[in-house]
Amino acid sequence: MANETVFKRYAGNPIVTASAVPRANSIHNSAIVKRGEGDYAAVFRVDEISLDCVLHVGFSQDGINWDIDPDPIQMRSSDPEIFATNFSYDPRLTRLEDTYYLTWCNAGPQGPKIGFATTKDFKTFTQGEDLLPPANRNCVIFPRKIDGKYAIYHRPSDRGHTPFGDIFYATSPDFVHWGCHRFVFGPRGGWQSLKTGPGPAPIETDEGWLLIYHGVWLSCNGYLYYVGGALLDLDKPWKVLYRTKDYLLSPTESYERIGDVPNVCFPSAAVMETDETLRLYYGCADTCVSMAEAKLSDVIQFVKTHSF
């Protein structure tokens, strides 16, 4: 199966552009979940015309046409030292039982760190302590506990554009104390030779945890971002079973190639539909949000047959 037959881009891409929010310069790399039939919710990354990066809530009945709050999320916290910075970006969402867990890059003068908040209704967000200190740029939470503990994939970083990137696994008993950091995988040739990073929250399947991730290589025209996939052991999610040598999605369309950061497909959300269709939401050229669909079984088969 060739990679171009796995994910089919939505014909109406991009589905979200800067026109959706009055002060937006761009909207991309956003987190989307399905709460029920005809009920989608999201946290969008909005880069304002001041080039501050803030987070906005959005709602949709079909996951394609969105109504986005024109005002940024106002996090609640009992501690004034816990706050979302004006450089908050690349959110991810995971549902555990009746609560949605939000992570994002909560960057400050010391560098990028991982912000953390919870919500039950996407109206009130309660912010907790940052999960990980600088420098760390990507973090996704598992949708259930592993061996009795909460678990994440994360990607240590630096203060700049990060010309490196390895994915790690970590656990916590309480969302405060994190440890047992295990190396998962890092760059490895071709389109993922410079860095890697976790995309949407891992999806549990009979074949293992499916992790959609981004891979980056450096060409003479700058950084190029691609979409890959990996299957990892259900009980030991730092153990790689399969990992794509061939990419699943690449920046080929004009809206993926032209923008504030050219040549970027950045996977940030995945939604399972009732017919086993996997909807992948991804940022395009750091400018807009697009969507592509595939059968979950086809994605798993591709990962298994196009691996290292």
Image (cartoon, rainbow, N blue to C red):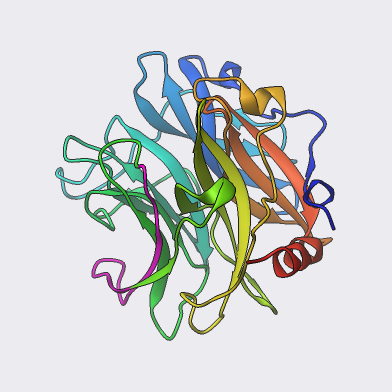
Asked if residue 262 is among those painted magenta in the image, a careful observer would answer no
Q: Where is 213 relative to 216, above or below?
A: below
Q: Where is 55 relative to 98, above or below?
A: above
Q: Dividing the image into 4 quarters, which one contains the C terminus? A: bottom right
- The quarter holding residue 244 reads bottom right
Could one spot residue 88 in this view of the protein? Answer: yes
Could one spot residue 57 in this view of the protein? Answer: no
- Residue at 62% from the left image edge and 54% from the top image edge: 228
Q: Residue 217 at x, y = what percent?
A: 51, 42
Start and end of the magenta stretch?
163-181
- Residue at 64% from the left image edge and 28% from the top image edge: 256
Q: Where is 210 relative to 249, above or below?
A: below
Asked if residue 165 is among those painted magenta in the image, a careful observer would answer yes
- Depth check, front residue: 138 or 25: 138
Relative horizontal placement of residue 50, taking residue 9 as reference (left or right): left
Q: Residue 19 at x, y = what percent?
A: 59, 16
- Residue at 61% from the left image edge and 40% from the top image edge: 282
- Depth check, front residue: 42 or 268: 268
Q: Dividing the image into 4 quarters, which one contains the N terminus? A: bottom right
Q: Residue 135 at x, y = what percent?
A: 25, 49
Q: Where is 234 relative to 300, above or below?
A: below
Q: Residue 189 at x, y = what percent?
A: 54, 53
- Depth check, front residue: 257 or 84: 257
- The quarter holding residue 148 reads bottom left
**Number of callouts:** 0
